Amino acid sequence: MLFSEHNFGAQRATYGSIEVICGSMFSGKTEELIRRLKRAQFAKLNVEIFKPSVDIRYDEQRVVSHDQNSISSTPVSNSSAILLLSADTRVVGIDEAQFF
């Protein structure tokens, strides 16, 4: 799906980067995501964390690792909601992105 400025308000272009944490099951991907996001929060950056609303394995409102470390998140039903909910955010974390 393409998103135009018309849909999300005319804003000047901003640049950033995408970091993907990949690995096999039980390799610590969510643990690493939580670690990076908590570090960004400690640095006082504006951080938003999203997870698919279908992911209710451990908690409906938190991203939780297999080691039970967790961080508050916003469940969303589709990826376009992330654009709407993260307007003034410096760091966006997305857990289990393959479910969108």
Image (cartoon, rainbow, N blue to C red):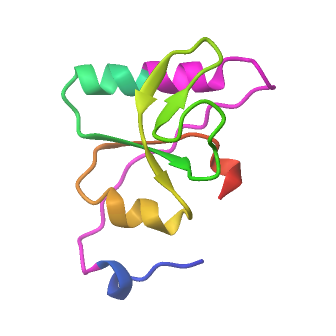
**Viewed as shown, does residue 51 lie left or right of 98?**
left
The residue at 51%/44% (across/down) is: 18
Counting every numbered tag in the picture gives 0
Q: Is residue 26 magenta?
A: yes
Which quarter of the rendering shows the N terminus?
A: bottom right
The residue positioned farthest toward the top in the image shown: 67
Residue located 45% across and 40% down the image: 61
Q: Residue at x 70, y 31 (%)?
A: 22
Instruction: Give the magenta range.
Output: 9-35
Q: In the visual, does 84 lie left or right of 97?
A: left
Whole-percent x and y of residue 55? 64, 44
Most frequent secondary structure within the magenta stretch: loop
Placement of 6 over or under 94, stated as above or below: below
Residue nearest the observer in this picture, 21 or 35 = 35
Residue 64 percent coordinates (x, y):
55, 26
Residue extending furthest toward the left: 44
The picture quadrant where one finds residue 100 is bottom right
Q: Is residue 14 above or below residue 39?
A: below
